[in-house]
Image (cartoon, rainbow, N blue to C red):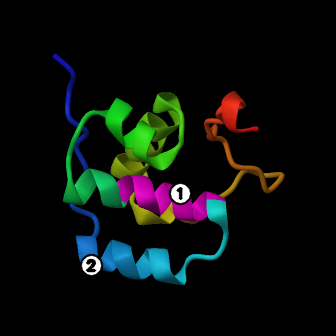
Amino acid sequence: MVETSRIKDHLSAEQIRMKMQMTAGFMKMQKWLVIYNAIIDPRPVSEIAKHTGLSEGSVYRIISEYNRSGPESLDSTGANGSMWFDVKVDPISM
């Protein structure tokens, strides 16, 4: 049985929608989209990954970081400005 993603109650769905509207940058938006999906329609990480275009590992890390460190963790980047998650690329569409 596949476990459904669980999100801690740091922000409401409406607050997350507001964050999404105010966020600049595709990669940061993807992080908020993962959390929003997990809150409004809890389902397995594999399904959220499919709907957001990210790898399952990235979705798991985003949710884990949000649960552990709160919303501030989604606004951060690495020391060199990089993001640590992988976007799936469909080789057929390239």
Q: Is residue 70 above or below residue 25?
A: above
Q: Tell me residue 31's x, y (percent).
A: 50, 56
Q: Quadrant of the N terminus?
A: top left
- Decide: few, some or many residues near mark 1? Use Cα within 10 Å; few <14, some 14-19, many ≥20: many
Q: Which residue is mark 1?
A: 30
Query: Who's the residue at 26% across and 33% down the image?
Result: 44
Where, by quadrant of the figure, is residue 23 drawn? Answer: bottom right
> Which residue was labeled with disc 2?
14
| Residue farthest left in this picture | 1
**What separation in Å lies between label 1 and label 2 (alpha carbons)?**
17 Å
Q: Residues within 10 Å of mark 2 (few under 14, many from 20)?
A: few
Q: Earlier in the sequence, mark 1 or mark 2?
A: 2
Q: Is residue 56 left or right of residue 40?
A: right
Report the disc number at residue 78. none
In this rendering, position of residue 92 left or right of residue 33: right
Q: Would residue 73 be visible to someone looking at this image? A: no
Amino acid at dot 1: Gln
Q: Residue furthest top?
A: 1
In the image, residue 32 lies in the stretch drawn in magenta: yes
Depth order, front residue of 4/88: 88
Q: Is residue 34 above or below residue 22?
A: above
Range drawn in magenta: 27-35
In the image, what residue type sits under mark 2? Glu
Assign the magenta stretch its main secondary structure: helix
Horizontal and vertical percent for residue 17? Answer: 36, 76
